[in-house]
Amino acid sequence: MVKENSRTESGEVEVKEKKIIEINGLTKRYNDFIAVDHITFSVFEGEIFGFLGPNGAGKTTTILMLLGLSEPTEGWAKVLGMDPLKEPLKIKRMTGYLQENMGFYRDLNAFQMLDFIAELNGITGEDKDRRINEALRSVGLLERAKKKIETYSRGMRQRLGIAEILLKAPKLAFLDEPTLGLDPDATNKMLGLIESLSRKNGMTVVLSTHMLDQAQKICDRFGIMINGRMIARGTIEELAGEKFNIDNKTYTLEEVYMKYFKEA
Ligand SMILES: Nc1ncnc2c1ncn2[C@@H]1O[C@H](COP(=O)(O)OP(=O)(O)OP(=O)(O)O)[C@@H](O)[C@H]1O
Ligand SMILES: [Mg+2]
């Protein structure tokens, strides 16, 4: 995590984390139903933020608002210092987004697809093919790269989505259930890739997932969302500390999550 240091008036060094995402009272209503209910939290530079919660909690709706793809009913957010309502295209260009249900131009092959993404992102010349091949190799799609996307399995399309993010190498990525539909080996590889992107390139990641054991391995902090409300956030130690009295035991994320879930 990148820290921004500053000195207080008394000369002490104050360590502050740089906010890449700042959310304040963000709310989304669909008629009488509140999908996201006044949530407030920040995501810091370089961290992997585990965005947890049961089906229908409001995670995807939140991500859509942060990308300017859905308009908040109330509250505000800043993403990379910008307002998603005012600068959605700029935010989209600077972030990676792996959607819940990746839609692709199924008539293209993987190479053509990434070539298109490269052009959109100003990656040109010799560098372009090298980077495309590297991204495809990283996700194990190089051999199938000249086959049409419509012939791909779900897991292969999921991996192509990650290849797109690898190619773009953004400062911030929203990964909405990136391991959904992947086999165990591909899941491990995918999480390894996400972790190395974050650790090596300093990419900030918002990772929405139901795979708690996996999330525990790679996430720095977590936010637990239930019924549209962010009921807890922090490191696993902080989350456990709030709910369990015994502090000389380490808890699994699953234990901690289930405790919050049952008491919500
Ligand atoms: N366009 C819409 N109109 C009405 N209700 C919606 C709409 N989009 C989402 N919702 C509702 O908002 C709630 C939050 O949905 P959301 O997709 O954000 O959940 P989620 O946390 O991503 O769940 P999951 O883990 O299943 O992906 C759900 O109850 C959903 O039915
Ligand atoms: Mg969702």
Image: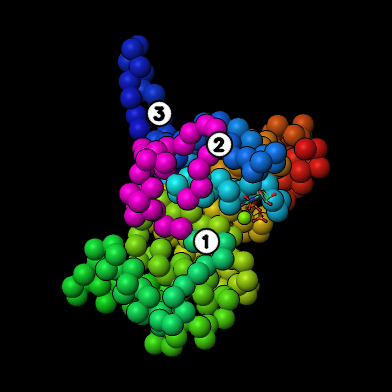
Pair 3/1: label in front: 1
Q: Is residue 122 visible?
A: yes
Q: Residue furthest top?
A: 10
Which residue is nearer to you in this view: 213 or 164? 164
Q: Position of residue 27 (x, y in %)?
A: 58, 36
Task: Tell me which residue sits at (35%, 79%) in the image.
Answer: 112
Q: Regarding mark 2 in the picture, which secondary structure is present there?
A: loop
Q: Is 91 within the magenta? A: yes
Q: Seen in the image, is 8 located left or right of residue 98?
A: left
Which corner quadrant holds the N terminus? top left
> Which amino acid type is shown beneath numbered disc 2?
Thr
Q: What is the quadrant of residue 143 in the picture?
A: bottom left
Q: Regarding mark 1 in the picture, which secondary structure is present there?
A: loop
> Which amino acid type is shown beneath numbered disc 1?
Gln
Q: Is residue 249 above or below residue 151?
A: above
Task: Tell me which residue sits at (76%, 35%) in the image.
Answer: 244
Q: Regarding mark 3 in the picture, which secondary structure is present there?
A: strand
Task: Determine which residue is flagged by label 1.
Answer: 99
- The residue segment tinted magenta is 69-97
Task: Determine which residue is flagged by label 3.
Answer: 15
> Which amino acid type is shown beneath numbered disc 3?
Val
Of label 3 and label 1, which has the lower sequence position?
3
Q: Position of residue 93 (x, y in %)?
A: 34, 55
Q: Is 175 within the magenta? A: no
Q: Residues within 10 Å of mark 3 (few under 14, many from 20)?
A: few
Q: Position of residue 60 (x, y in %)?
A: 58, 52
Task: Determine which residue is flagged by label 2.
Answer: 73
Q: Position of residue 155 (x, y in %)?
A: 57, 75
Distance between the alpha carbons at the discs numbered 3 and 1? 34 Å
Q: Is residue 30 above or below residue 188?
A: above
Pair 2/3: label in front: 2
Which residue is nearer to you in this view: 15 or 223? 223
